[in-house]
Amino acid sequence: MATIKWGVLGYARIAKTSVLPAIAAAHNSELRAVASSDPEKRKECQALFGCPVVYSGYDELLEDAEVQAVYIPLPNSMHKEWALKAIRKGKHVLCEKPIALDAADALEMIQAAQENKVLLMEAFMYRYTDRIRQVKAVLDSGEIGEVRYIQSTFRFLLNRPNTIKVQPGLGGGSLYDVGVYPVNFVGMVMNGQLPESCVSESVMENGVDMMFSALLKYPGGVVASINSGFNAFAQMNSEIIGTKGRIEVPDTFQGSEGAITVVTEAGSRQVAVQESDRYTLEVADFADAIIAGRQPLFTLEETHRNMQVLDMLFASMKSTGCPTGIFRKPERA
């Protein structure tokens, strides 16, 4: 069976705890190389994962002809630079979310991937879970009627000092870090529609949002509420309310087993959710897409839409010209 040889740019926490084990577990993937400027990290990577080759520089890894796909877990501000370098070396790229800092940069990356005939995917691993499959199945069934309101939250208490998550120059802040998940969840429920308007509020510290909330209004009168944060007790849940019922989705972005709840006039029922190895499923799908010459599950169209919504949210948050901070999508000419 064909396998894809992976290179990893940086020995970040998410690489060590989640994606490197996923590459090892995926049936169609193998680890070829990891690059890190830290000799202790290189040594640990070889000891833990049996990495055949380690490099001290990212450019060295990109020159490795055996590396077919690159995973990028670098700080947000570095995603575009190193994704473009990898793409131009003919490497397929799985890039951590957010793929870039704005929609224009994301579009440049997408176009580069298309021009160089390689795959590019943003790493939204939660979309590979049985939990999300069950949510989509209930929505598609029409059981809760037409969607009218969506709520989605992802926050936790950040207690690691000097983390890149709170450094503005590295693309820190809760919206970029965990808020992108509620943004994407809402967009998935809305089948890719862009909101007509949004209003945002944030609690800022040292140049990054420590808590972020927004209301988004979609065509047809649908309203969505999203929340993210680093400064309060952990919470991760979502709710979708329709004309005939609602869906309650605890642990929305996790791969754990559990249940979602569907409530209608007929009563309340539990829909069982199986445990999903979301990172391994993500790696395996991306590798299979390379081998089969197809698109992966998470599309670039969705990535671009996600970034457009983030642009709207940041514009609303930073708006000074409007007392309410409301951002409205410009009318088409």
Image: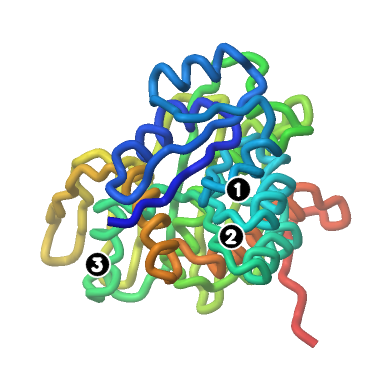
In primary-sequence order, the first of circles 3 and 2 is 3
Q: Is residue 278 left or right of residue 130?
A: right
Give the residue at x 70% y 57%: 88
Residue at mark 3 to residue at mark 2: CA–CA distance: 22 Å
The kind of residue tagged 3 is: Ala
Residue at mark 1 to residue at mark 3: CA–CA distance: 27 Å
Q: Residue 58 appears in which quarter of the rendering?
A: top right
Q: Element at badge 3?
A: helix
x%, y% of residue 330?
77, 74
Residue that label 2 marks: 306
Q: Is residue 307 left or right of residue 252?
A: right
x%, y% of residue 187?
49, 63
Which numbered disc covers residue 175?
none
Q: Element at badge 2?
A: helix
Mark 1 vs mark 2, foreground winner is 1
In the rendered view of the protein, which quadrant contains the N terminus?
A: bottom left
x%, y% of residue 172?
68, 34
Q: Are marks 1 and 2 in contact (CB under 8 Å)?
A: yes
Residue that label 1 marks: 98
In primary-sequence order, the first of circles 1 and 2 is 1
Residue found at the very far front of the displayed protein: 65
The kind of residue tagged 2 is: Asn
